[in-house]
Image: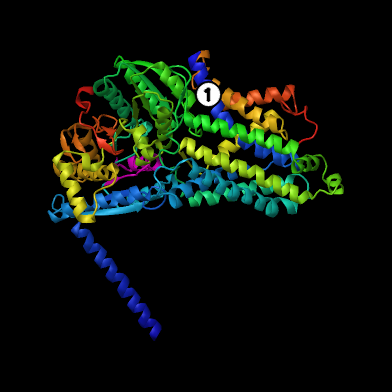
C-alpha cells in the first residue's frame, strides 16, 4: 500500500508535466484545428532558456531563492510566448486557407528548426541546471516510507493553478469568451466583431508560454536535459491531449494525469504480473490504452461534454 | 626541340625514382600498419593511436630497430567506417606490412580482419570488444583489450569482495551493449552465489525513473549494477537522492564520464562505484609509468584514453614477437603468440598470454569511486582478478 502511494505520487508528478504541455496542444487545436507539432520544441526551449539564464546571467547567485526563480519564470513566459506568436505569424497564418495538410508540414518544419538551433546552442550535450535549486523546501512525509518532496509539491501546486487559472480565464473573461467563439466558427466570430487574428495570437502566446514554464519546471525538477527533450515530452503530451479529448482543457489535464499514472503503474507492477522489462513495454501499453479509449469514445474522454471547444 | 628535351628530362626523372625505390628496398625496413579513425566521430581516439604508436616506433628505431632493420609505420585512415576499412586493408597489403594495429571500433575492425586473415597478415586490435570478432577461428587475429564479459565478472567481484553484497540488482537500458553486459553480470553473479533479486531495464529516452527506483528501493538490495550510459546514470543518481532512497550504485564503463556527476549532483553521486578500464595515469606498473612519462614529454600532455595505451601495447607485442622469433613472417609470429608468448610485461599490465581464439587472458578493469568532491578516483581496495582465471 505504501509503495502504491509512492508510485501514485511518482505518476502524478510525471502526469502533471504532461498535462501542462498538453494544454498548449489542446488550445491551438481548439481555435485552429491544427496540431502544433512545434509545441514540444517550444517547451524544450523553455528548459533551454532557463538553463541559459541560470548558468550565465544569474550564475553568481549560489542560493537562488523563490523570488529569483519567479523572475526567471516571468522572463521565460514572455520569451517562449513571443516565440509562439512569431511562429504562428510566420509559419501558420500565411497557410490558414491552404487546407489542413500544409500547416502540419509547416509545423513539423518549425519543430525541426527549433530543435536544430537548440542542438547547436547546447552543443548536443546534456546540460545541467545549477545544483540545489529550491532544495531548501521541506519534504512532506505522509508515512515513514512515502514522501512528497518539496519540489514535487511545488510542481503539483503550480501545475494545478495553471490549469484552474486557464479554465477560469477561458470560461469567465471576455477574451476567453472570444476564444470559445473563434473555436466554433471564424467567420461568424468576425461578424460578431471579434478580431480573429488577435485572438489566435493570444492563444499562441498563452499555450507556448505555459509550455515554456513547464519546460523551466522540468529543468529545475530533473536538473538536466538535452535538445531531444521536446520530442519525448511533446509526444506524450500530445497523446494526453487526444486521450482527454483534444480541444478540451479539463480533458487535456485529465489525459496527462491518466497517462502519467498508467505509465508508472506498468513499470511498478509489470514485473509482478510476469512482464519483465516493463520499461520497454511501458509505451506500448500506454498506446494500447489510448487505442482502447478512442475505440470506446472516439472523441476522447471529455470530448463530447463540452460543445464549444477551446 | 623543347619537346624532346622535356621528354628526356621526364624519362630521366622516372628512371631516377625507380633507382631510388630499388635502393630503398635494399635497406629493407619492417613495415607495420596502423589503421584507425583519423577523421570522423572517433578521430580523437585514432589520432591518439598514432601518437602512442609513433612514439614507440621512434624509440625502437633509436635503439637500432628490430632485427637490425628500421621499423616503418604505415598509417591509414578508416574513419571508423566498415567500407573504408576494407579499402584500407587492401592498401596495407599493397604496402607489404608484416602486421596491422587497429581498428578502433568493432564495426571497422570486422571487415579488415577477414582480409588480413586471408592474406596471412598479423592483426591486433587495441580496442574492439565485440565478442563475435574472435568467434570466427581466425588464426591471425588477436586483441590486447578485454571483452565485455570480463567487465561483468570484475563488477560482480567488486560487489562481492569490496562492497560485501549478497543480494544485488542489475539494471540496463536495452541497448545491445548494456543488455549484453547485464546478461553476463547476471550469469557471473549467480555463479558466484549472489542473489540477483532485481533485473530490469530503463528506457533511455525517459527523463523520469522514479517508478523503477521505487521498485529498486523496495527490493532492499546491497548493490545495484547499472550497465547503461552516463546521462541516464546521472539522472538515476539524482532521483535516488530525491526519493530519499539508500541505494549503493555501481556503474559500468559507459558511465565513466564526469558529466554523470554534473547531472546527478555531487552530493547524490558521492560514494558511487564505477567499474572501468583504468585511466593511463592510474596504472602502477613500471612499464606504464615509463610510457606515460615519455608520452607526456613528447606531446606535452598525458595520454587521455586507455585505448591509446593499448595501441602502444599492440605494437610492443608485435615488436617482441619479431625479436623472439627472429622472423618477419606473420604466420610464424601468430603461431608464436598463440603458443609460446606469455608473461609479457605490458604497459597496460602483465600479459599472461592469448587464448586459442586470440583474446587476451586476464583483465585490467579497475574499481573507481566518486569521492566527496565529486571526482572519479581510484579506489583503495581492488578486487583481485588473478583469482578469477
Bounds of the magenta segment: B99-125
Q: Is residue A112 magenta?
A: no
For image coordinates 37% across by 78% down, the residue present is B7
- The C terminus of chain B sits in image quarter: top left
Q: In the rendered image, which quarter contains the N terminus of chain B? A: bottom left
Observer-nearest of A104 and B111: A104
Which residue is drawn at the image coordinates 18% and 59% (left, top)?
B27
Pointer 1: what residue?
A: A9
Rendered position, A46 above or below A239: below
Tell me if mark 1 has few (under 14), some (14-19) or many (20+) residues whose alpha carbon lies within 10 angstroms of its own: many
Q: How is the image coloured?
A: rainbow
- Please check the rendered image and state whether residue B122 is part of the magenta-colored stretch, yes or no: yes
x, y percentage for residue B280?
24, 42
Towards the viewer: B367 or B288: B367
Q: In the picture provided, is B24 more to the left or to the right than A181?
A: left
**What x and y, as percent, mark residue B52?**
25, 49
Amino acid at each position: 500500500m505504501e509503495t502504491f502511494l509512492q508510485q501514485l505520487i511518482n505518476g502524478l508528478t510525471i502526469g502533471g508535466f504532461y498535462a501542462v504541455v498538453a494544454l498548449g496542444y489542446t488550445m491551438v487545436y481548439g481555435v485552429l484545428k491544427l496540431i502544433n507539432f512545434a509545441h514540444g520544441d517550444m517547451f524544450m526551449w523553455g528548459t533551454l532558456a532557463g538553463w541559459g539564464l541560470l548558468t550565465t546571467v544569474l550564475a553568481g547567485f549560489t542560493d537562488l531563492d523563490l523570488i529569483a526563480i519567479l523572475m526567471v519564470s516571468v522572463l521565460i513566459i514572455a520569451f517562449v510566448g513571443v516565440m509562439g506568436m512569431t511562429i504562428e505569424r510566420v509559419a501558420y497564418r500565411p497557410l490558414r486557407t491552404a487546407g489542413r495538410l500544409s500547416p502540419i508540414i509547416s509545423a513539423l518544419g518549425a519543430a525541426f528548426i527549433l530543435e536544430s538551433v537548440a542542438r547547436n546552442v547546447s552543443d548536443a550535450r546534456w546540460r545541467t541546471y545549477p545544483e540545489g535549486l529550491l532544495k531548501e523546501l521541506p519534504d512532506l512525509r505522509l508515512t515513514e516510507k512515502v514522501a512528497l518532496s518539496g519540489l514535487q509539491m511545488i510542481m503539483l501546486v503550480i501545475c494545478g493553478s495553471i490549469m484552474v487559472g486557464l479554465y477560469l480565464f477561458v470560461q469567465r473573461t471576455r477574451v476567453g469568451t472570444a476564444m470559445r467563439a473563434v473555436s466554433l466558427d471564424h467567420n461568424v466570430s468576425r461578424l460578431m466583431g471579434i478580431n480573429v487574428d488577435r485572438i489566435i495570437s493570444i492563444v499562441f502566446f498563452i499555450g507556448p508560454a505555459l509550455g515554456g514554464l513547464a519546460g523551466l519546471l522540468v529543468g529545475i525538477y530533473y536538473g538536466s536535459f538535452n535538445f531531444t527533450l521536446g520530442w519525448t515530452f511533446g509526444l506524450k503530451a500530445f497523446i494526453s491531449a487526444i486521450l482527454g479529448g483534444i480541444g478540451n482543457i479539463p480533458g487535456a489535464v485529465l489525459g496527462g494525469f491518466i497517462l502519467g499514472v498508467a505509465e508508472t503503474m506498468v513499470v511498478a507492477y509489470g514485473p509482478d504480473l510476469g512482464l519483465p522489462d516493463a520499461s520497454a513495454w511501458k509505451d506500448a501499453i500506454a498506446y494500447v490504452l489510448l487505442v482502447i479509449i478512442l475505440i470506446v469514445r472516439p472523441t476522447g474522454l471529455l470530448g463530447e461534454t463540452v460543445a464549444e471547444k477551446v | 626541340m623543347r619537346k624532346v628535351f622535356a621528354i628526356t628530362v621526364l624519362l630521366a626523372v622516372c628512371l631516377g625514382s625507380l633507382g631510388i625505390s630499388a635502393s630503398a628496398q635494399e635497406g629493407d625496413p619492417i613495415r607495420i600498419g596502423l589503421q584507425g579513425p583519423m577523421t570522423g566521430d572517433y578521430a580523437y581516439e585514432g589520432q591518439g593511436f598514432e601518437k602512442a604508436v609513433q612514439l614507440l616506433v621512434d624509440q625502437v628505431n633509436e635503439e637500432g630497430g628490430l632485427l637490425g632493420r628500421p621499423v616503418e609505420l604505415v598509417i591509414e585512415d578508416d574513419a571508423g567506417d566498415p567500407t573504408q576499412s576494407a579499402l584500407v586493408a587492401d592498401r596495407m597489403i599493397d604496402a607489404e606490412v608484416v602486421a596491422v594495429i587497429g581498428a578502433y571500433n568493432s564495426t571497422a575492425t570486422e571487415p579488415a580482419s577477414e582480409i588480413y586473415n586471408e592474406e596471412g597478415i598479423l592483426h591486433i586490435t587495441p580496442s574492439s570488444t565485440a565478442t563475435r570478432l574472435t568467434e570466427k577461428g581466425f588464426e591471425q587475429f588477436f586483441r590486447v583489450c578485454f571483452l565485455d564479459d570480463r567487465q561483468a565478472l570484475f563488477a560482480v567481484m567488486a560487489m562481492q569482495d569490496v562492497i560485501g553484497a549478497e543480494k544485488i540488482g542489475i539494471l540496463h537500458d536495452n541497448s545491445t551493449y548494456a543488455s549484453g553486459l547485464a546478461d553476463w553480470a547476471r550469469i557471473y553473479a549467480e555463479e558466484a552465489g549472489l542473489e540477483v533479486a532485481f533485473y530490469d531495464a530503463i528506457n533511455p529516452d525517459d527523463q523520469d525513473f522514479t517508478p523503477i527506483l521505487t521498485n529498486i528501493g523496495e527490493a532492499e538490495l546491497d548493490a545495484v549494477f547499472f550497465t547503461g550510459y552516463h546521462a541516464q546514470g546521472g539522472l538515476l543518481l539524482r532521483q535516488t537522492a530525491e526519493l530519499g532512497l539508500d541505494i549503493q550504485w555501481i556503474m559500468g564503463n559507459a558511465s565513466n564520464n564526469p558529466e554523470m556527476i554534473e547531472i546527478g549532483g555531487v552530493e547524490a553521486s558521492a560514494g558511487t562505484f564505477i567499474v572501468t578500464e583504468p585511466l593511463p595515469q592510474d596504472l602502477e606498473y613500471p612499464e606504464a609509468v615509463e610510457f606515460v612519462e615519455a608520452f607526456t614529454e613528447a606531446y606535452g600532455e598525458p595520454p587521455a584514453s586507455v585505448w591509446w595505451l593499448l595501441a602502444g601495447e599492440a605494437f610492443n607485442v608485435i615488436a617482441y614477437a619479431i625479436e623472439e622469433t627472429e622472423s618477419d613472417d606473420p604466420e610464424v609470429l601468430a603461431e608464436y603468440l598463440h603458443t609460446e608468448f606469455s608473461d609479457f610485461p605490458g604497459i597496460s599490465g602483465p600479459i599472461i598470454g592469448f587464448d586459442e581464439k586470440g583474446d587476451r587472458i586476464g583483465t585490467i578493469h579497475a574499481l573507481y569511486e566518486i569521492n566527496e568532491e565529486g571526482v572519479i578516483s581510484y579506489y583503495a581496495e581492488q578486487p583481485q582478478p588473478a583469482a578469477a582465471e
